[in-house]
Amino acid sequence: MTMQIDCEDRDEMRILTVVADRIDAAIAIQFKDAVRAATQDAPPRVILNLHQVSFIDSSGLGAIVAGMKLLPKGTQMELASLNEAVDKVFRMTRMDSVFKIHADAAAL
Amino acid sequence: MTLLVACDPDSHRGLGPAAASAAEWQLKLDGRFEDVSATLISVRAWLQDRTGGHCGSSWEMALAECLNNIAEHAYSDEQPGEIDLWLTVRCNRLSVIIRDHGSPMPNHTLPQVSAPDVSCARADLPEGGFGWFLIHELTTNLRYKRLGSENWTGFEVSVNG
């Protein structure tokens, strides 16, 4: 099982588009590895575009947090295009206070 | 003439073979993360059909956490096993009963957890421990029983958002 993440550098941002329907226990490790590989030389802002993701579980949430903690010093991780289910996980765990969340990746 | 139907009004609240036998749909899956994902996808399709496409996400979060917990802690990579799942939709709620043959819960009871602390420095943010918190928040009638060599877990969750 592989996790595909498409990267786009623009202005001072790197937009990582997760090409997967789920970030869950089955794929959490691959996701973490893919984010780390895509952010080693990241600019000051990394935006995780979750437009295609319809579901994350606590493992997926943990993998996103882990990905953020591995960012180079001075780089912030932000999130974009969370659907209702994904947004709910962040709100319930209060992780929406930890990440800047953009409603629409297309408007970045 | 009054027809009296003998029934146990609490059968859907219980745990064990009798409670399970009243369920609408029974599934079997391997206790591994990939099989949990595949099962949730099937259940989502079934629920969208049963609820006219408006089942929400709460049920999937609660069921994912419970099933992943069994895959990770009751079973293990070295000692995998099967999970039986019984599902019923009633009054905008999904009733779930789960059986596995893995290790028991510590102290044979459900863990009690509080909300994870996210007020700390970035480097100290928790990467886990959210599962049981989410289950407690999302479900009602959450219950667990060890019967012989079997774990029985049950709960109800909204299928209306």
Image (cartoon, grey):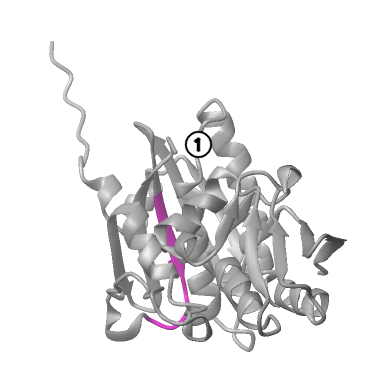
Q: Farthest residue to the front: give it.
A: A11
Question: Residue drawn 53% across and 51% down?
Answer: A87
Q: Does the magenta stretch include residue A23?
A: no
- Residue identifier under label 1: B55
- Counting the numbered discs, the total is 1
Give the magenta part as a residue range: B96-104
At x 56%, y 52%, the residue is: A86
The image shows residue B120 at horizontal and vertical percentages of 41, 80
* Position of A33 relative to B86 (above/below): below
Q: In this view, does B160 lie above or below B130?
A: above
Give the position of the N terminus of chain B as an image quadrant: top left
Q: Is residue B63 above or below residue B72?
A: above
Q: Label 1: state its secondary structure.
A: loop
* Amino acid type of the residue tagged 1 in the rendering: Cys
Label 1 lies in what chain?
A: B
| Above or below B151: residue A80 | above
Q: Tell me the residue at 31%/74% (across/down).
A: B146
Q: Which residue lies furthest to the top in this view?
A: B1
| Closer-to-camera residue (B38/B98) | B38
What percent of the width, then of the height, locates residue B89?
A: 42, 37
Whether residue B116 sits left or right of residue A103 in the image: it is left
Q: Is residue B107 or residue B118 the one in the foreground?
A: B118
Say which residue appears at 70% left-offset and 61% top-offset.
Answer: A48
